[in-house]
Image (spheres, rainbow, N blue to C red):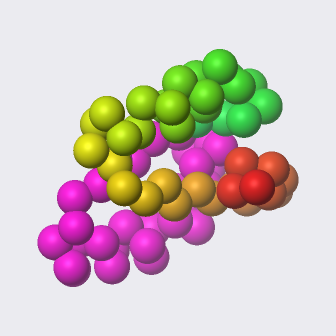
Amino acid sequence: MGSISDLETMQGALEILDELGVPYEKKVVSAHRTPRMMVEYASTAKLRGLEVIIAGAGGAAHLPG
């Protein structure tokens, strides 16, 4: 998510993951405000055991790219 305000948009996906028992990380990482953090988050995802990244953005859809 690009900002905490995107949480409402992503809530449906989180509920489905919960129902299916799929573990996940929920993190706000802005491609515009914190681009280095976004690159670090994505580049270390595999090390943390992540297999999929679901990205969402409200007003600007640059993050899901």
Q: Which residues are magenta?
A: 1-28
Query: Which residue does the image show at 16% across and 72% down from the upper left?
Result: 21
Front-lying residue, 46 or 4: 46
Question: Please, which residue is most extreme toward the left here?
Answer: 21
Left or right? Give the position of 50 relative to 13.
left
Which residue is painted at 67% across and 35% down in the image? 30
Is 35 located above or below residue 4 in the figure?
above
**Residue at 45% across, 76% down:** 12
The stretch drawn in magenta includes residue 6: yes
For the C terminus, the quadrant is bottom right
Residue 26: image x %, image y %? Answer: 39, 48
Residue 16 horizontal side relative to residue 23, left or right: right
Q: Residue furthest top?
A: 36
Q: Position of residue 45 (x, y in %)?
A: 41, 39
Q: Quadrant of residue 16?
A: bottom left
Residue in the foreground of this view, choosing between 59 and 34: 34
